[in-house]
Structures are given as C-alpha cells and as structure tokens.
Image (spheres, rainbow, N blue to C red):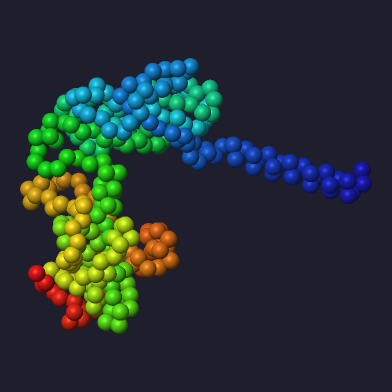
C-alpha cells in the first residue's frame, strides 16, 4: 500500500475516533432548561376531555368560603418518559403550606398536569403562588389571588387589590411635571401623582431651581402652578397646590392600617422623562435612571421669587 494511502487511512481513523468521542460527551451532558412552560391557567372547576384537563372557569381571583377549591393546570414541553410532578403551594407570606405530587409517563414531548387545593373560610387572603417541579427541576410558577377571608374582612383598612388593580390605580393618578426656568425654558421633567383635590405630590428635584411648573395631564391638557405647600429635600418630596380637581387620586391610609411585618411593594426607580428611552415609553432604560435611597449630588434649593413655598 502506498505511503500516502496509509497516511490518509490513519487520518480518517483519527477523525472518526474524535467525532465518536465528541458525540458521546454531548449525549452525556444533560440539556439545559429541560422543561419549558407552554401555558398555565387556574380555575375552580374542570373536566377531562380526550386525555386533557379543561378548566371550565379560567380566572385568577377566588373567594374563600364561596369557591370550594383552586385548580392550576400546566402544559409543558420536555423529555418523554416517566416523571415525578410536584406542586408547591405558597401562601401570601411566601411559606409552603401544601405539597401535591403525582407520577406520570409522558409519551410525547408535550404533556400536561394539574394540582388542586381545597379552600375554606380560614384560607388567608392575598396573592398565592403554585411552583411546579418536574423530577426536582423548576417547571414554572402560576400566581392567583384569594380574597374574602373573614380574617381579612374583619381587619380595618381597604380591601386587597390585585397587582393589575394597583398598577391601574397608580397609572390613572399619575401626571408629568415639567420644570420651567426663569427664561421660560423647560429644564427637566418628572412624575407626580394626585393625593387629593388640588394636591399633587412629586420629587423635590422636580421643583429645584424652577420658576414655574407645567403640569401635563393624561388627557393632553396642561396646567401651571407656582405654589409649593411643603417640601423635604432629604426625604426627596414636594407637595404642590394646583388649581384642578382630579377625578381620582391616591388616598392616604390610616396610621394603624400598616404594621411591622406587613408585605409592601415599592417602585424605587426615578426616570428623567426627557431622554430618548423615556420619550419612547421605555422608562426602565432611562439614561439618567436613579434609585431611591442612593443619594445624588444635589444643588441648593433655588426657586425663583415666583415659585412660592408655603402657598396657602
């Protein structure tokens, strides 16, 4: 056999050996993201149809003492074969109060399953979560709200709002405040929200150095004011007086309605309202994004004579 033929044969054998080793290694590495959630839905009743479970009343809010149970249904895409499914029910306090499990052999790459939790009048109100696990791996989370618990109803304070309700309420009361300097030139924008008739709360930076403030309402109309009722530089807030009676505003809670240990949510990010990202509505990408609690260098309070602190 010629020398070059033997050399080619050796190279081919070496290539096949390396290729086989690489394929063996690839097969031994477990795939990432073994299970992908296709959808999840919750309801109080359902039925099976052609091997699938159908939720009869899909919804995310349930009433303790009225609804008998909550059922959460998942559809996944993942490995075929026998699997161990676990559902971890987490209360509004974030504690696991119930673990439901079952075993099922998936014949195809797409499969489904569901868990149910019984409700009673003593079931705590709030936002619950069901965390799904397959063979010990995370396989999705589904959130829902339980309301109407006597424990919650007997407590003083406003009724529990869902995340969507909180967002919509805050959105409806929000305005844009434009700072105007002594030359009549816009010097910056900030957000504010109504807290009563003719009362507008905003950040201190929104009035710092302003001669006049222009209020841009959600319907496109504009107002102006030069009246500052109160402010606090270090707590970064200012209360304005505006000649306008909004239809909705955020009401102050009672002093005793919140206690130590209650769960709250805070939006700590402050956007400028003027950069390209803010003008496109992508305020989370603001070029001058700042965070509440992280102090920036602040200039002295320089209102012009026309901006009246303590106006009645």
Q: Is residue 270 visible?
A: no
Indicate left or right for 91 with 52 as reference: left
Q: Position of residue 241 (x, y in %)?
A: 16, 66
Q: How many marks?
A: 0
Task: Name, please, the residue furthest toward the left.
Answer: 256
Q: Quadrant of residue 57?
A: top left
Task: Name, please, the residue furthest toward the right.
Answer: 2
Quarter of the image with the C terminus in it: bottom left
Which residue does the image show at 9% across and 35% down from the upper left?
154
Quarter of the image with the N terminus in it: top right
Which residue does the image show at 37% across and 59% down from the upper left?
284
* Of 102 and 125, the residue lying toward us: 125
* Of 89 and 10, the residue lying toward us: 89
Which residue does the image show at 19% across and 53% down from the upper left?
250
Q: Position of residue 267 (x, y in %)?
A: 27, 55
Q: Position of residue 87 (x, y in %)?
A: 34, 29
Which residue does the image show at 16% across and 26% down from the upper left?
121
* Of 138 and 30, the residue lying toward us: 138
């Amino acid at each position: 056999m010629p020398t070059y033929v033997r050399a080619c044969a050796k190279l081919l054998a070496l290539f096949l050996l390396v290729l086989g080793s690489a394929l063996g290694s690839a097969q031994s590495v477990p795939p990432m993201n073994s299970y992908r959630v296709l959808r999840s839905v919750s309801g109080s009743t359902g039925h099976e149809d052609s091997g699938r479970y159908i939720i009869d009343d899909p919804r995310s809010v349930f009433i303790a003492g009225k609804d008998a149970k909550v059922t959460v249904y998942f559809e996944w895409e993942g490995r075929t074969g026998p699997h161990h499914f676990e559902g971890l029910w987490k209360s509004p306090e974030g504690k696991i109060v119930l673990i439901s499990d079952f075993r099922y052999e998936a014949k195809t790459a797409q499969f489904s399953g569901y868990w149910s939790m019984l409700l009673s009048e003593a079931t705590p109100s709030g936002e619950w979560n069901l965390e799904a696990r397959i063979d010990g791996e995370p396989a999705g989370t589904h959130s829902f709200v339980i309301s109407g618990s006597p424990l919650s109803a007997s407590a003083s304070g406003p009724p529990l709002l869902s995340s969507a309700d909180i967002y919509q309420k805050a959105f409806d009361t929000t305005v844009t405040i434009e700072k105007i300097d002594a030359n009549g030139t816009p010097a910056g924008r900030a957000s504010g929200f109504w807290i009563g008739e003719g009362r507008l709360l905003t950040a201190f930076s929104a009035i710092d150095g302003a001669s006049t403030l222009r209020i841009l309402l959600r319907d496109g109309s504009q107002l102006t004011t030069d009246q500052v009722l109160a402010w606090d530089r270090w707590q970064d807030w200012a209360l304005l007086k505006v000649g306008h009676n909004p239809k909705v505003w955020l009401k102050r809670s009672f002093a005793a309605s919140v206690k130590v240990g209650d769960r709250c949510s805070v939006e700590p990010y402050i956007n400028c309202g003027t950069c390209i990202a803010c003008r496109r509505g992508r305020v989370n990408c603001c070029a001058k994004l700042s965070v509440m609690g992280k102090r920036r260098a602040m200039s002295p309070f320089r209102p012009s004579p026309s901006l009246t602190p303590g106006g009645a």
